[in-house]
Image (cartoon, rainbow, N blue to C red):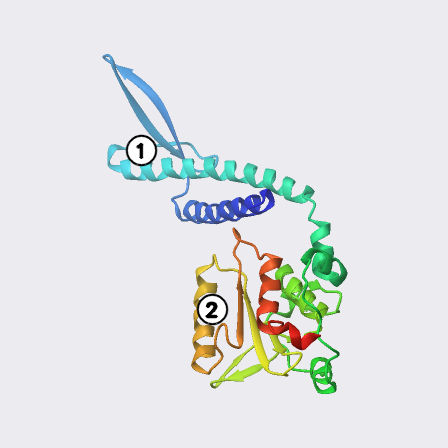
Amino acid sequence: MTLFQLVNREKERLLTEKAALEKSILDAPSGTITFCKNRTKGRTYYKWFVRNGRSKRRYLRRKERELAKILARKSLEQARLQDINHELKALDAYLGKHCKSLFLEKLTTSPGIGELIAGSEIKPPPELTEELEKWANDKYEMNPKFPEMRNILTEQGIKVRSKSEAIILMLLTMYHIPFRYECRLEVGGRVLYPDFTIRHPLTGEFFYWEHCGMMEKSMYRSDYMNKMHVYISNGILPDHNLILTYESEDHPLDISIVMDKIEEFFFCNKEALK
């Protein structure tokens, strides 16, 4: 994991803790606790007081000890909240100066650079048939959900949701594999939007590619399992006509995995490409 990812993760953790503290402080009784130390006949004891705003402090009697404990905890939470705010400022200062990898930006938007890095011996197929060319370029119904999250513009003019999807799109384009991004698919009475709907460049057979990019999140994994159930129940099977790639914060997508998938599903019969 990179330092940038660690800082982002720590910021997310602190923001979660901050929200919990703010709620706890808001729900606590009003007032600030203070104390004074007394000593009588060789014995030290404390007196606890509560002050609200500028009002005169009020002595907390023994029967109000539970209130004193709650106010003491509130003071600790307020001190922790101050520490968190200082830490968040420091993290934001780093994130503000952090320079994203410009090379990676080029990689995900430039087939030329991708080809050099991939170093693959895979040969591109012959020119696509007119039908496949037309299918790839025709208009289609795209996923209407959260269009604002498609914020990475590729060299092909298609906006995607992640750099990993941009890498997949780049390599599909580089090897002349016809595809549609987030195209509507009705299957088993459900409407899905696979990340990529693909036609085999030689046979025209349909394939679907799902990139599962947030596997560290439990809700995301649950949605993934539901989608897999729909696919498998309707004859769209992993390693048959369903291509799957995975990543999490700790394990980003490796471009070599994408290359292996493309070779496995579309170029395993290299003789046909000569």
* Depth check, front residue: 262 or 75: 262
| Rendered location of residue 212, percent (x, y) | 53, 64
Determine if residue 96 is in view: yes
| Rendered location of residue 233, percent (x, y) | 43, 81
* Depth check, front residue: 89 or 35: 89
Dot 1 corresponds to which residue?
Answer: 60
* Depth check, front residue: 215 or 177: 177
Q: Is residue 265 left or right of residue 140?
A: left
Q: Is residue 270 left or right of residue 222?
A: right
**Is the residue marked by circle 1 packed among few (<14), some (14-19), or many (20+) residues within 10 Å?**
some
Q: In this rendering, is residue 67 above or below 180?
A: above
Amino acid type, callout 1: Leu
Alpha carbon distance from label 1 to label 2 = 56 Å
Q: Which residue sits at x=57%, y=78%?
A: 207
Image quadrant occupied by the C terminus: bottom right
Q: In this rendering, is residue 254 above or below 17?
A: below
Label 1 element class: loop
Label 2 element class: helix
| Rendered location of residue 269, percent (x, y) | 61, 74
**Is the residue marked by circle 2 packed among few (<14), some (14-19), or many (20+) residues within 10 Å?**
some
Q: Which residue sits at x=64%, y=70%?
A: 147
Q: Which residue sits at x=62%, y=58%?
A: 255
Indicate which disc, 1 or 2, sits on the residue closer to the N terminus: 1
Would you identify the image quadrant in which residue 154 lies? bottom right
| Rendered location of residue 118, percent (x, y) | 67, 58
Dot 2 corresponds to which residue?
Answer: 224
